[in-house]
Amino acid sequence: MKVESFLQMIEKSSEGAAGEYFTGVPDSLLAPFCEYLLGAYGIDPKHHLIAANEGNAVGLAAGYHLSTSKIPIVYMQNSGEGNIVNPVASLMNDKVYGIPCIFIVGWRGEPGVHDEPQHVYQGEITCSLLDLLDISWEVISAETTEAEIEAAMKRFLPLLKTGKQVAFVIKKKAFSYDGPKKEKTAAGTLIREEAIRSITKVSGGDPIVSTTGKASRELFEIRTAAGEDHEKDFLTVGSMGHCSSIALSIATFRPESPVWIIDGDGAALMHMGAMPVIASCKTGNLIHIVLNNGAHATVGGQPTVAGDLKLADLARDCGYPYAVSLDSGEQLEVELEKARALAAQNKGPVFMEIKCGIGARDDLGRPTTSAEDNKIAFMKYLQSIE
């Protein structure tokens, strides 16, 4: 289904109450939807905002309704359902404020459709979670017709008028968009994979916790190409935004070695409250690296606000004793060596922002080991460090 047709039917069937305001977190299944929004509106606080996380998007949506009486549209991957539980249940629900909202949910891990391990269980419970939140839903596929959208909206509109929320659950390849695409601007020029290669070189035998998305995939392939095992790396294939918290506890309970975090800007923004917590713990053997390309690169390159932020200054304000930002490769290994020396002397946590480009190899694969095998090997490796 064409994105334009889908949104036109929502606007028409809602009697003009919906279709003027969009916010959310990008998803690869919703890439045509996101491309349309960026082409039509760009980033505009009055029409379209990419939020830090899905809960943030619900708050923005609530404010839009309170100020205009109109119905907001919030988009997200189904993994973001967890982030909306609190604001939906304690703010939007009709037993509280009764704020209507239309959710557009990408259905990763749909039962019967092959997907990555981090999506399987989330896919199984996607619609059950919506039921639990009292959100009526309709599944959209490539075969869905405009008449079916109109029928769904006819069912939804009375619910929305009473302050309830509804959702369209979007199957893989359900949307298409052939219009102009907004040019993507990266935060830097360094190739992310080369930056990760330098990290693996300098880190030696230190454990690494890497974020979800292409960064972990690149780390896995770098190890494979070098003929190395993967036991030193914990690949955080899901739970976007939480790899730094995982690493903080590892560094706290395994102080024998520096512990590295390979984070992304989108992930760091999603749960940025982790940064002052990390700094407050004064865990000296922790090295927190954010590969900042100013984009949600894994799901289509949609922009984040991190491209305009000075993350190293932010880290210093949070309390990191040492923070640096790099936008070229000239000093990369020197700074990585310095970070490792500081962590080895228990003088961290250390923060490094490495500004990167958006692209990745077309032939980039995925980890060939299971998540459970990764966990077992990594735990065994941690126990071996003296």
Image (spheres, rainbow, N blue to C red):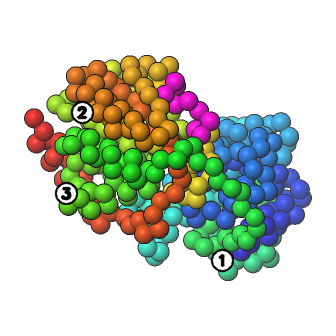
Name which residue lies at 47% across and 59% down. 360
Q: Amino acid at mark 3?
A: Asp
User: Label 1 to label 3, Cα distance in Å?
Assistant: 42 Å
Residue 312 seen anywhere in this rendered image of the structure: yes
> Is residue 311 rendered magenta in the image?
yes
Q: Residues within 10 Å of mark 2 (few under 14, many from 20)?
A: many
Say left or right for 30 vs 10: left
Identity of the amino acid at label 1? Ala
| Circle 3 crowding by C-alpha within 10 Å: few under 14, some 14–19, many from 20 | few
According to the image, label 1 marks what residue?
142
Residue 256, image x, y percentages: 16, 31
Q: Which residue is mark 2?
A: 258
Is residue 162 rendered magenta in the image? Answer: no
Alpha carbon of mark 3 to alpha carbon of mark 2: how far?
A: 19 Å
Q: CA distance from mark 1 to mark 2?
A: 49 Å
Q: Quadrant of the C terminus?
A: top left
Give the labeled residue for mark 3: 229
